Amino acid sequence: MHNNRGAKAPFTFEEKVMEDLYGYKKTILRSEVELSDIDKEIFKNFDYKFDGVTEFELPHFEPFKEDFSIGVIYGSSGSGKSSMLAQYGKEEELTWDNNRTIASHFDSVEDAIERFGAVGLNTVPTWAKPRHVLSNGEGFRCDLARRLGNDIVIDEFTSVVNRDVAKSCSLSLYKYVKRKGLKNIVLATCHDDILEWLQPDWVFNTDVKRFASRGLVRQPIKVKIVKGNRNHWELFKKHHYLSEDLPASAHCYLAVWNDRIIGFSSVMSLPGWTPPLYEGDKRLKWREARTVVLPDFQGLGIGVRLSDAIADMMIEKNVRYYSKTSHIRMGEYRQKSPLWRASASNLKDRSSDIHDHKKRLIPLERDRICYSHEYIGENNKSYDPKYNRPDDPQQSLF
């Protein structure tokens, strides 16, 4: 064992002012260590001349004085990102109670749901866990959810998550920041694949020591819908917010992005009578059974669009289409969407209803208040009898 007694300060800062053509002020970070016998032998073997002193020149960087939404300091490891990030502040240290769920650490139910959505952490079973049992990726998003606010800094942004999670988290964060009008959020990262999803106001590249162009255009997400089967449910069932069961009569569909299966949706027939939408409307009724997007791809808006696309396909097949959910984000989306109309049982408290109505649209849920909607489509297309077209064999539903 080597002796560290009498060692010099492990890290010191020295700032030197040197006039170059632009009058820039150079900041030199200087560290000095005491060399052990092991050090001397190692460096001698590799013919590396080292006297214990290391100097690093930070890239010239003047923090913005005007407000902005999101700024990014990007570059390879060891290029000065963290030191530059410190000019904007210190990352908040969080305290978690391991005897409580992560959801219980937020100010309110609404605050928790909104913040989880802001980082793409939309899997309800995960909300029920304590912080210390989460995966690295879940933990990163959970910590980010608590830190969100004005004038924050986040180091190593998306470093511990796979790149699919990084993209979905970045897009969710961008939308939340814009919606809330948050200011002066600075992220440091080694990855440039998230920039088009974050749409930052500025990017400083520490490798080339200059601001990068903002010519970042996010490419559209093109998802294909293909027929699936009950076996595919095995991949998704543990991520459904309510139940791992799948009705025996359900017809299954898959969402595919870049040749990867990322989403699942299923539909089933809905018996009973409802008033027609127009004279002669005798269409059959179908309803959504399950819709799930894998956690790595949550936050991209795929779930609601997958649900809408399946619903539209059903209308094109000349059936009426309904859906019921107690998932707040899905339900609130439909409350605001012109593509859906609320049914009679929408947001009704049915806990005291003891009657077994034979004509109700969707089986009664007495233990929870649900959102209940019918899909009417763009320009109220479900009201138009002309949408009674022959089946398209490439998108056959039945």
Image (cartoon, rainbow, N blue to C red):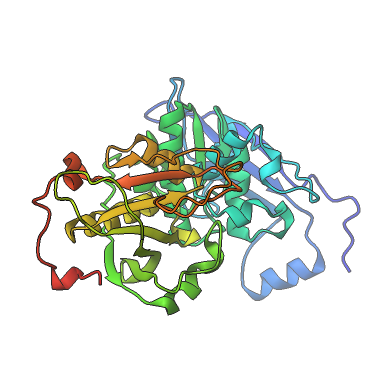
Give the x, y percent position of residue 246.
48, 69
**Image position of 26 with respect to 299: above or below:** above
Side of 20 where 389 appears, left or right: left
Query: Residue 264 at x, y = what percent?
Result: 40, 65
Rendered-image quadrant of the N terminus: bottom right
Residue 86 x %, y %: 60, 35
The quadrant where residue 4 appears: bottom right
At 43% from the left and 50% from the top, the residue drawn is 324
Q: x%, y% of residue 360?
A: 41, 50
Tally of numbered tags: 0
Q: Nearer the viewer, residue 121 or 212?
A: 121
Asked whether the viewer can see residue 61, the reply is yes
Image quarter of the C terminus? bottom left
Q: Residue at x 42, y 30 (%)?
A: 179
Kindly tell me whether residue 191 is visible in this rendering.
no
Residue 48 vs 132, above or below: the answer is below
Q: Residue farthest to the top?
A: 66
As drawn, which residue projects farthest toward the bottom?
A: 231
**Residue found 32% across the figure and 38% down from its top:** 337
Task: Work out whether 106 lies above or below 325.
Answer: above
Using residue 136 as the reference point, say whether residue 306 is left or right of it. Answer: left
Tell me what residue is drawn at x 55 percent, y 52 percent.
78
Name the residue nearer the viewer: 178 or 224.
224
Of residues 65 and 296, the one nearer the viewer is 296
